[in-house]
Image (tube, helix red, strand yellow):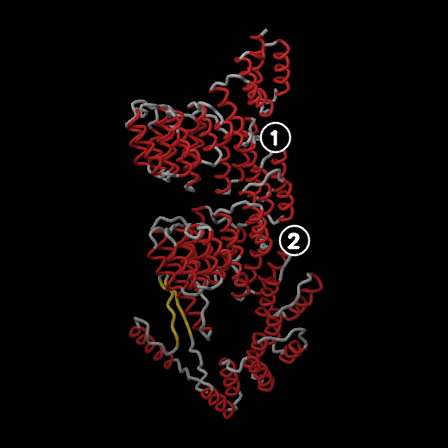
Amino acid sequence: MERSLINLLKTCAVSPSLGRSAMAVHGSAIKSGFITRPSMQNRIVVAYVKCSLMVCARSVFDEMPQRNAVVESAMISGYSRCKKFDEARQLFEGSKEPSVVCCNAMISMYVHNDREVEGLNLLRDLYSMGVKPNEFTLSVVLLGCSNLEALEEGKQIHAFVTRGGFSLDLAVSNSLISFYARCGRMEHASFVFYHMPDKDVYSWTAMVTGYAQNGRTGDAARLFDVMPQRNVVSWNAMICGYQEQEDDEIAMEMYVRMLRKGQLPTSSTLSVILKCCVCLLQFGKALQVHDQAIKLGISSNVFVGSAIVDMYAKFGCMVDSQKAFDEILEQNVVSYSALASGYAQNGDILVAADLFNKMPEKNLVAWNFMIAGYVHNGLQIEALDMFSDMIQANVQPNQFTLSSILNACASPQASRNGRKVHGYAIKVGFDFYTTIGNSLITMYAEQEDIVSVLAVFKRMQQYDVVSWTAMVSAYVKNNRIHEARQIFETMPEKNLISWNTMIGGYLQIRNSSETDEEKYLALSGSSADALELFCKMKEFEIKPDHFTYNCVLVACASIGTLQQTRSIHTATITRGFDTDIGVANALINAYGKCGNSRDAEHVFNSLVNPDPVSWNTMITGYSQNGQGHKALQIFHRMCESGVQPNHVTFISVLSACSHAGEVEKGWELFESMSRDYGIERGQDHYACMVDLLGRAGQLCEAERLINDMPIRPDTVVWGALLGACKTYRDVDIARRVAKNILNHESINASVYVTMANIFADAGFWDDAAELRVRMREKQLLRSPGCSWIEIHNRKHSFLAGDKSHPEWNIVRMMLSTLYIHIKEDNYILDVG
């Protein structure tokens, strides 16, 4: 009978769901009288503990006349699992003679519940309690040191291991390897590893994992390849290591290799591989991994299921993400966070907030994703309110929290809140963290406070590649491109983002020059610098991404360099970026700006689903290259394909009508904007119509259109009419137009120059002379003419009267030769 009851209790201890059965056996033990036997009492307590019935276990435990170390440690472990740490500590302190087993249970409780310091303190008290630590004690304490990255304390324990003769113990040696690896001291881990008399698969795996986690994937791979035996943890360590180093392609290759070796993946494997699929934008591969998880029966596992939820959310498939979430058997804060974060990142912040409120428990990660979600959706006030609620809920923020909040304070309007958060970071000692410093640099840069940017940078104790890149970006945002380049050149390490920031920075320069020619020269110079940096980037074997190609194609477009556009086009095909819609649109624009409509057509026609930008860019390209009729044709194709034109489309198509001389068509499109498409006409649309009417010689109609505008016309609109007045020598309308422009901009030099030319063409020499006198009085300088030519992929720019070109003497000789040929052809210079 007693043996049967004990066997039943063993069964109850194996399955936590058999609590009622344990109670029934307990009742039978009382009725049969076996309850008084110590062995029966021990078994009942252990069974209750395993079933998490701590009240029942404690009632039996308190009635026991004799308690051994096994039952006491079981009670401590039970309280630990139930998060009842005070009860565990009281029980331990009430023990008459604490054993090493009980001490191990207490230290393990502390270490596994983020209370490592208390565990280390208990270790120090062992000898005063008359308890000698054993191998398990040392292994658990080393885990605690690993979690704290407490290098000095761990070294002291290592010295104790050596003195106490524990260095031959396999588990202790493996714990030492893991400890040193976690602290980034792989040379110490290697010393322990190579001095072990015996090694098991865990020893090898600990070393491989250590190398991988410390970014030394090459060393990890070399050790992995010579391992006498591998397990799934070894494979996972390599895959995870590559993924953490952003070598997602190699991680995927390692995964395929693992499958070929016959090793089945675990939930950890598939979770990491799904991250790789997201980073590589391989949606098809991600679907295959999901199918594999289903076949293995682990898709409803909370870890894999959460990774699947996150994967679908990252690809914008929120219906599938929700479905994957619903299929998870035991949803927890991780799965809730993955789904809610997905909704937030996809713009459904209200659904995300509702999920957050429904969470059975909220940890720091949950608060962080919600704050980040509000920031992502531009709801800075809500993000700050959430941060305040988090503090009131006694949840301590971490570096990620403060980084998100600082992003919420990046606008100049939020500078006061930003300084408050900065003050909080200093108060809690977070300002020394590199991640916080990086966020502060970004925040102050957005607020154009370069003084604070420098102060933060100088205060930081450590810099990473993000810190340096943030400084480059800060100077770019403050239009100090030369200082940005200096910092870029001195960076100890550069990554793709660093190069992209500097290349993109050249295209963001805000030039203060007054004339179009000077602005062009500044822009062409910065574009040339961007292209030069792109070539240098390839020398450093940094692989460009879609952002890089977009930037350099914009540079090519701005200076019209066809050969480099073609070269970059070839590179995009080689790298597989030619199918990226953004890159394709940049190619169409570059070819259009270079006057090569044929290649622009080729890129456009290769697109499976051109977006509105694609259509607009093609229309603009045709229009700018004098192919107005083709522009109108592609506009009609756009409408027939079901793509809705926008305000940019009509600017391009009205400009096309102007170049093609299609006045009636232009009026028809202009009238249809608000009537058929609900698009409000802006200054640019009116300027196009004025230009169209002006080119057709309908100057009075153009002036009437301006006077009837529902909005106040700007200088661009009036300028379009003034240009037409010059063409048709209409002095009367030109006088009225010039008066209106000068009412807006009294020092507009181009108006004086144009009016002087109009007067001269009409023979009004006195008026022309008077204007030139007024220009001198106002110190208005006429901008010199500008021309440029591309030779061997290099753009050469010239200003009238400029002799600064390094090959000016050759240019002067060529001009002299040209003048001679011009005179021989009886050309008479118009000096009027």
- Residue found at the very far bottom of the displayed protein: 766
The percent position of residue 86, horizontal first and vertical second, equals 53, 33
Looking at the rendered image, the quarter that the N terminus falls into is top right
Vertical side of 19 occupied by 736: above or below:
below
Circle number at residue 710: none
Identify the residue position indicated by label 2 in the image.
642
To which residue does mark 1 refer?
Answer: 329
* Secondary structure type for disc 1: loop
Side (left or right) of 777 relative to 686: left
Mark 2 crowd level (few <14, some 14–19, many ≥20, 10 Å Cα): few
Taking the spot 52% from the left edge, 61% from the top edge, the residue there is 416
Front residue of 542/20: it is 20
Q: Nearer the viewer, mark 1 or mark 2?
A: 1
Q: In this rendering, would 138 be left or right of 195?
A: right
Residue shown at 46% from the left, 28% from the top: 259
Q: CA distance from mark 1 to mark 2?
A: 44 Å
The part of the image, by quadrant, that contains residue 619 is bottom right
Q: Is residue 670 above or below residue 547?
A: below
The answer to whether residue 602 is seen in the rendering is: no
The picture places residue 28, in percent across and down from the top left corner, at: 63, 12
Give neighbour class at mark 1: few <14, some 14-19, many 20+ (Cα, 10 Å): few
Say which amino acid is labelled 1. Answer: Leu
* Mark 2 residue type: Gly
Mark earlier in primary sequence (1, 2)? 1
Q: Is residue 613 visible?
A: yes
